[in-house]
Amino acid sequence: MRSKSLIFIAMLGLVSMAASQSSCAPEPTSSDIQRERQETMVAEGVAQTGMPAIVNFRELKLAKELYELRDQANLATYSYVENLSPAVVHGITARGGKLTFICDSIGFPLPYAVQFSAPESMQKWIVPGAVGGERRYGVEKLPQAEPNGLFSPGSAEASWILCKDPSGKDVFPSYSEPRLFVSLFKYPFD
């Protein structure tokens, strides 16, 4: 009889734990419901349409080749800035006028918003007001800082350029925006 009582108490404990855990789940919001319905519709579209019949993978091969060419050590490039004022160029009007040489550079510019680490990471946090001194944790995808401790923007118009010092062999980072260019040394602009 005692073993049946223990089993009953254990079962009652499991049921109460399951009920308390299910009561912690928030009610779905209208956005949650809409997202689920949209996912169902997109899944149906994928099921009806299927994948494109790509057999040559030419764009993927071109992207691979571009990555490999950009990865060459000491890839010499030449950086220019576009004059934003329209100008007539021998019979036609150029959209932005002429190009002005900035510097001999290494590689191609990197967008200012490029990130070294993943922009987001799964992070654990303590749920405030835990009952009975028990610590409960939540997990959420949150923005992640870069190694310098700053958070990079999702997008930016600026770029970083590695320019060669015109009076030496050193290479220095230069910062360029559509209407701004910043460098560690003076350039001979036209």
Image: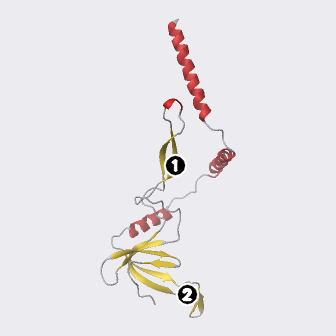
Residue visible at 53% across and 79% down in the picture: 179
Measure the alpha-carbon separation of dots 2 and 1: 46 Å
Extreme-bottom residue of the structure: 90
* Badge 1 element: strand
Q: In the image, is 29 to the left or to the right of 106? A: right
Q: Name the amino acid type tagged 1.
A: Lys
Q: How many marks?
A: 2
> Is residue 99 or residue 134 the one in the foreground?
134
Q: Residue 170 at what x, y percent from top left?
A: 31, 77
> Is residue 182 or residue 116 the one in the foreground?
182
5 is higher (above) or lower (below) than 92? above
Q: Residue 58 at what x, y percent from top left?
A: 49, 64
> Is residue 62 or residue 156 the one in the foreground?
156
Residue visible at 47% across and 86% down in the picture: 100
Q: Report the residue marked by disc 2.
A: 97
- Find residue 20 and name its label: none
Q: In the image, is 166 to the left or to the right of 20? A: left
Residue visible at 55% across and 87% down in the picture: 97
Q: Name the amino acid type tagged 2.
A: Gly
Name the mark nearer the viewer: 2 or 1: 1
Q: Report the residue marked by disc 1.
A: 141
Q: Residue 79 at what x, y percent from top left?
A: 43, 80
Q: Residues within 10 Å of mark 2 (few under 14, many from 20)?
A: some
95 is higher (above) or lower (below) than 63? below
Residue visible at 69% across and 45% down in the picture: 30
Q: How crowded is mark 1: few (under 14 residues within 10 Å), some or many (20 or more)?
A: few
Of pointers 2 and 1, the one earlier in the residue sequence: 2
